[in-house]
Amino acid sequence: RKEVEQDPGPFNVPEGATVAFNCTYSNSASQSFFWYRQDCRKEPKLLMSVYSSGNEDGRFTAQLNRASQYISLLIRDSKLSDSATYLCVVSRGGSYIPTFGRGTSLIVHP
Amino acid sequence: EAQVTQNPRYLITVTGKKLTVTCSQNMNHEYMSWYRQDPGLGLRQIYYSMNVEVTDKGDVPEGYKVSRKEKRNFPLILESPSPNQTSLYFCASRGQVGNQPQHFGDGTRLSIL
């Protein structure tokens, strides 16, 4: 089993739709979690950290489920500009060495 | 402005000709790392450094070297590049304390002919 797994997609959704991605991780000792956004062949940029209690930033909501070892990202009211690849990052150990998922591609169409 | 700067942004070169990709950060970050990104394989870590003079192998270190003589710089060295090292490379850094996200450079697109 890969350390961090994501459905590569693509997820094709119309503008205004709600879409959710999951990311599973195998190491139960993982300690920090992030979602990054990456536009085509550009650098990944932090979208949001994921906290144990869940957190929201505008249209984006992130959740952590430690029991089932997954994190999720919910995007409400999708915009064309949300089209990108969303990378899940899980860090392990006291040194917080990060492991990236391969990303989930989102395409929002008019 | 806080940033991670990589150079060059693009490079086309030939097999066997040594090259160095520089990475510099101005945020006084302890942790720096190098990744390569290939279609369908995602970001794979090449090397990372926890601090000056402390480096360690990532998932795909073969064919690469790094050094960390100063806190701000973390160059990636390809002593004898080969075509299978054609890729998009990213440098990243973050602070050591607690749960901090990484900041990425703009990327370096390397083509080895």
Image (spheres, coloured by chain):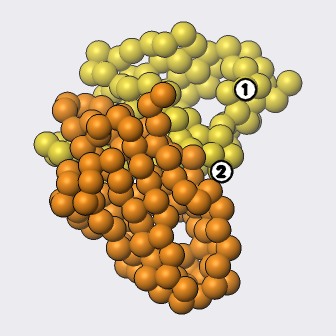
The residue type indicated by label 2 comes to: Arg
Looking at the rendering, in which quadrant would you find the C terminus of chain A?
Answer: top right
* Of the image marks 2 and 1, the number of the one nearer the N terminus: 2
Q: Is residue B59 left or right of residue A12?
A: left
Q: Residue at x 81, y 29 (%)?
A: A109
Instruction: Identify the residue at horizontal 44%, vertical 54% (top origin).
Output: B23
Evaluate whether residue A88 shows in this view: no
**Furthest-top residue in view?**
A58
Label 1, residues with CA under 10 Å away: few <14, some 14-19, many ≥20: few
Label 2 crowd (10 A; few <14 / some 14-19 / many >=20): some
Q: Which chain is orange in the rendering?
A: B
Q: Chain of mark 1?
A: A
Residue B58: give x, y in percent of width and height.
31, 64
Q: CA distance from mark 2 to mark 1?
A: 16 Å
Position of B103 compared to A38: left or right? left
Chain of the residue under the numbered disc 2 shown in the image: A
**Chain A representation colour:** yellow
Asked whether residue B98 is in view, the answer is yes
Which residue is farthest right? Answer: A110
Circles 2 and 1: CB distance less than 8 Å? no
* Lateral position of residue B112 relative to residue A22, left or right: right
Q: Amino acid at mark 1?
A: Ser
- Residue at (57%, 52%) from the top-left corner? B107
Q: Residue furthest front?
A: B70
Q: Position of residue A72 (x, y in %)?
A: 44, 29
Q: Nearer the viewer, residue B94 or B53?
A: B53
Q: Which corner quadrant holds the N terminus of chain A?
A: bottom left
Q: Secondary structure at mark 1?
A: helix
In the picture of the structure, the residue carrying the numbered disc 2 is A41
**Which quadrant of the structure image shows residue B63?**
bottom left
Which residue has dot 1 on it?
A81
